[in-house]
Amino acid sequence: MESKEFALFIAEALAEKKAEDLVILEVTQVVGYTDFVVVAGARNARQLQAMIGYVERHVRDTLGRQAYGVEGLGEGAWALIDFGDVVVHVFRNEERQFYDLEGLWTEAPRVPFDPDAVPAAAT
């Protein structure tokens, strides 16, 4: 799976868990450590932790890929999953405004993504 397809796959998984304001940035020309950054918002710490856990399991179970690392999960305000070519940032809404990753990488093109086109997750 190409990096862009993988970023879209992750965004779909986050959308299934009701992530807010999903953004996919192609950062290949901006940073040297990854190709795409997926940024999502969570209403609270519990939702944030559920989204991170779901993405990790869904990627592992569906694609057989393991994350290189997960950071920040214990605080419940922000978490990161590093898959190498795609890095996922999930923030509670207040922290997302503070860190403003989209503002940091304004020159990075956004990948079109419509979360409303993603079917609801089966429970």
Image (spheres, helix red, strand yellow):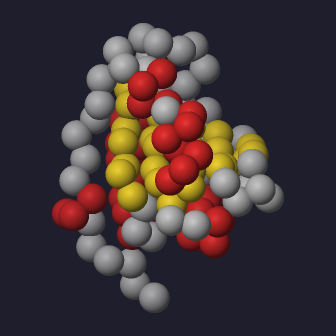
Q: Is residue 42 left or right of residue 70?
A: left
Image point (22%, 53%), residue name: 114
Q: Is residue 7 left or right of residue 62?
A: left
Q: Which residue is nearer to you in this view: 7 or 23?
A: 23
Q: Quadrant of residue 68?
A: top right
**Residue 23 visible in this rendered orientation of the protein:** yes
For the N terminus, give its image quadrant: top left
- Residue 19 location (% of width, % of height): 43, 61
Q: How many marks?
A: 0
Q: Is residue 93 left or right of residue 117?
A: right
- Residue 75 location (% of width, % of height): 77, 56
For the C terminus, give its image quadrant: bottom left
Q: Residue furthest right?
A: 74
Q: Is residue 78 left or right of residue 96?
A: right
**Residue 60 visible in this rendered orientation of the protein:** no
Image point (35%, 15%), residue name: 107
Reply above or below: 44 against 121: above
